[in-house]
Amino acid sequence: MKPKFRLILIGVLFLILGLLEHCMGPFWWDCNPPYLLCAVVVCAMFSGEKAAALFGLVSGLFADAMASGIFGLRAVMFLFFGYMIAFLTEKILSRNVISCALTGILSVGFSELAEWGIFCLNTPVDFATAAQYVFLPRVVMSLPVVLFLYYVFTLLYRERDVYPVRR
């Protein structure tokens, strides 16, 4: 697959996931999984550090524009997660389903904790109720999304396309 066509497909995928996350109604327990963050995590596993950071920044700005809250918070978090996961994938982690699922769940968990921590500074919230109805369902619902996106990205980034065989 040509790199330009792959980039267009990834852009369309990010747009669809962003619209699905912010424009569609909640699925279970009055919340949606964070589709864009899951896509940034999986994209970071398959692309380099600069590309992952760029995808993280753009999708974070899109998520900030569509949602309420502090503008730029998701952009900074997505940029950080994209860069760090791409860096760790190149240096330490292997590119497989288990590492993708673990980094996806950890990224969503840390992102939700950061957002709830900042939200709780302004508004008194019972953390146990918030964890039961928002935090844990979003983390649990992110696992099938990450696994599905891992499958999609393995189709987009085949090993022979990314790492050509030298003869």
Image (cartoon, rainbow, N blue to C red):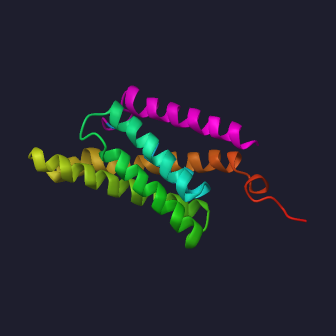
Quarter residue 94 falls in:
bottom right
**Total marks in image:** 0
Q: Is residue 12 above or below residue 89?
A: above
In this rendered view, identify the residue nearer to me: 155 or 57.
57
Q: Which residues are magenta?
A: 1-30
Q: Is residue 76 above or below residue 98?
A: above
Q: Position of residue 79 (x, y in %)?
A: 42, 52
Report the side of 55 relative to 71 (left or right).
Answer: right
In this rendered view, identify the residue nearer to me: 19 or 58.
58
Residue at the far bottom in the pictured view: 92
Q: Is residue 7 magenta?
A: yes
Residue 76 visible (yes or no): yes
Quarter residue 100 falls in:
bottom right
Q: Give the residue drawn at x 50%, y 45%.
A: 55
Q: Is residue 165 above or below residue 76?
A: below
Residue 42 visible (yes or no): no
Q: Give the residue drawn at x 75%, y 57%.
A: 159
Q: Position of residue 97 (x, y in %)?
A: 59, 59
Give the prevailing secondary structure in the magenta stretch.
Answer: helix
Q: Position of residue 74 (x, y in %)?
A: 34, 45
Q: Give the residue drawn at x 75%, y 42%.
A: 2
- Dividing the image into 4 quarters, which one contains the C terminus? bottom right
Q: Give the residue drawn at x 70%, y 46%.
A: 155
In this rendered view, identify the residue nearer to me: 145 or 78.
78
- Dividing the image into 4 quarters, which one contains the N terminus? top right
Q: Is residue 56 above or below residue 167?
A: above
Q: Position of residue 131 (x, y in %)?
A: 24, 51
Residue at the far right in the pictured view: 167
